[in-house]
Image: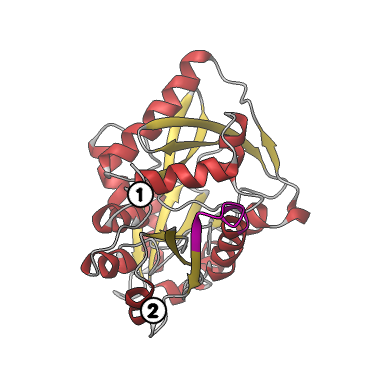
C-alpha cells in the first residue's frame, strides 16, 4: 500500500482554499484502495507526525506563503522525503513576483513593467506616483510581492492609488505594475508536457480572489480558446519556457494578458488550486485527463511509482 501524506491548511491567506483542494483530492484518492492517506497541517507537531507515518510521498497542497515559497519544501528536503510540486529554489523564485519578473525579462519573456514600493523602507508615495507617471502611467496594478490567489490585488487610477495602497500596509513590500488590458489567458504545464490553455471572462474587474473561488462571481471559462494556431502554440511555449527557467516540477500555471497580439506573462503559480472551480483540472479534463489521473501524474512526477 502506498502511503500518501497530504499537507493542507497552513498559515497563509489561502488556508481555506488549500483545505478545499485537499478535500477534492482526498475524495478522488479514496476511490483507489491502494492508497493510505493522512491529512495533516504544518503545525508544531508536523515533523513528528511525518516521521511516524513514514510516507512514500508528501502531496503538498498548501497555497501561499510557507506552503509554496520554499519554506515547507526546505523542511521536507531535510527530512529526505519525496514531495510533489516544485522544490525549494523554484518555489521561492516563483512566489517572489519581483525576482521572477526580472528572470522573465532577462530571458526575453514579455511582462508588464513595474516598480517596487516598500512600507518597510518608508518609500515616499508622492515620489512613487511621479515615478509611475514617468515610467508607465496609470492605471496600475498593486499586489503583494509574495502572495497568491490574487490576494490583496487592486487595479488603481491615480485618484484611488493612495487609498488602495494603504490597504496593503500589512504586506510591507508591494509590486506596482502597469495595467495591461485585454484577454485573460492561463496556460498549464504538467511535468514536461504542455497541458493546454483556458480563457477567463470575469464579470468583476479582473480574475481576483472572489472571481476564482466564488460561484456567485460567475466567471466565464472558455475552452477551447479562440486563438490562431500560431498564438496557441506561442502562449504554450512561453509557459513552458517559464516553467523550465524556474526549474519547476509537477504542475504549474502561468497567467497571461493577451493585448495587441502580444502575450504578457503576469506570474507563474507552482501550486495551482485543485478545487471544483480550479483551472488546471478543467484544462486537463478537456485533454481527456481525469482528475484522478491528473493527481497521479503529479505524484509520478515527484518520483513515486516511476
In the picture shown, does residue 230 fall above or below 237?
above
Residue 182 in view of the camera: no
Give the position of the C terminus as an image quadrant.
top left
**Which residue is depicted at the point 43% across and 30% down?**
194
Q: Nearer the viewer, residue 236 or 154?
A: 236
Q: Does label 1 or label 2 sit earlier along the sequence?
A: 2
**Which residue is depicted at the point 53% across and 62% down?**
151
**Residue 28 sits inside the magenta stretch:** yes
**Which residue is depicted at the point 66% across and 53% down?**
211
Question: Tag count in the figure?
Answer: 2
Q: How many C-alpha atoms fall within 10 Å of the one at disc 2: few (<14), some, or many (≥20)?
A: some
Point out residue 275 in the picture as x, y percentages from the top left corner.
61, 54
In the picture shown, does residue 79 fall above or below 178?
below
Point out residue 191 in the picture as x, y percentages from the top left corner.
37, 38
Point out residue 250 in the picture as x, y percentages from the top left corner.
38, 45
Give the position of the N terminus as an image quadrant.
bottom left
Q: Residue furthest top?
A: 229
Magenta part of the protein: which range?
27-36
User: For this view, does 262 lie left or right of residue 209?
Assistant: left
User: For this view, does 276 lie left or right of residue 185?
Assistant: right
Image quarter of residue 18:
bottom right
Where residue 59 is drawn, which disc sits there? none
Residue 174 in view of the camera: yes
Q: Which residue is mark 2?
A: 49
Point out residue 152 in the picture as x, y percentages from the top left corner.
53, 64
Q: Which residue is mark 1?
A: 304
In the picture shown, does residue 105 fall above or below 80?
above
Q: Nearer the viewer, residue 9 or 293?
A: 293
**Residue 19 sits inside the magenta stretch:** no
- In three-dimensional space, the C-alpha distance between marks 1 and 2, rounded to whole angstroms, equals 20 Å
Q: How many C-alpha atoms fall within 10 Å of the one at disc 1: few (<14), some, or many (≥20)?
A: some
Amino acid at each position: 500500500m502506498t502511503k500518501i501524506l497530504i499537507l493542507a491548511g497552513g498559515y497563509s491567506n489561502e488556508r481555506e482554499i488549500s483545505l478545499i483542494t485537499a478535500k477534492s483530492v482526498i475524495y478522488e484518492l479514496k476511490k483507489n484502495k491502494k492508497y493510505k492517506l493522512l491529512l495533516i497541517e504544518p503545525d508544531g507537531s508536523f515533523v513528528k507526525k511525518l516521521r511516524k507515518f513514514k510516507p512514500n510521498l508528501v502531496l503538498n497542497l498548501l497555497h501561499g506563503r510557507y506552503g509554496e515559497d520554499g519554506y515547507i519544501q526546505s523542511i521536507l528536503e531535510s527530512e529526505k522525503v519525496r514531495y510533489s510540486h516544485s522544490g525549494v529554489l523554484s518555489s521561492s523564485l516563483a512566489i517572489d513576483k519581483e525576482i521572477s519578473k526580472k528572470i522573465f525579462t532577462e530571458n526575453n519573456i514579455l511582462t508588464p513593467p513595474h516598480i517596487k514600493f516598500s512600507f518597510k523602507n518608508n518609500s515616499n508615495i508622492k515620489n512613487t506616483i511621479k515615478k509611475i507617471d514617468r515610467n508607465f502611467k496609470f492605471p496600475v496594478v498593486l499586489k503583494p510581492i509574495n502572495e497568491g490567489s490574487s490576494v490583496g490585488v487592486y487595479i488603481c487610477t491615480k485618484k484611488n492609488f493612495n487609498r488602495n495602497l494603504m490597504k496593503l500596509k500589512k504586506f510591507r513590500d508591494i509590486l506596482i505594475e502597469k495595467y495591461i488590458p485585454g484577454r485573460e489567458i492561463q496556460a498549464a504545464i504538467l511535468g514536461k508536457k504542455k497541458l493546454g490553455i483556458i480563457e477567463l471572462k470575469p464579470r468583476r474587474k479582473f480574475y481576483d480572489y472572489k472571481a476564482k473561488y466564488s460561484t456567485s462571481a460567475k466567471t466565464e471559462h472558455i475552452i477551447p480558446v479562440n486563438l490562431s494556431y500560431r498564438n496557441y502554440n506561442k502562449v504554450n511555449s512561453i509557459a513552458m519556457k517559464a516553467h523550465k527557467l524556474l526549474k519547476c516540477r509537477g504542475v504549474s500555471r502561468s497567467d497571461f494578458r493577451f493585448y495587441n497580439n502580444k502575450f504578457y506573462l503576469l506570474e507563474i503559480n507552482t501550486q495551482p488550486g485543485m478545487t471544483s472551480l480550479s483551472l488546471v483540472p478543467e484544462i486537463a479534463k478537456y485533454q481527456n485527463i481525469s482528475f484522478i489521473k491528473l493527481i497521479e501524474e503529479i505524484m509520478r512526477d515527484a518520483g513515486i511509482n516511476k
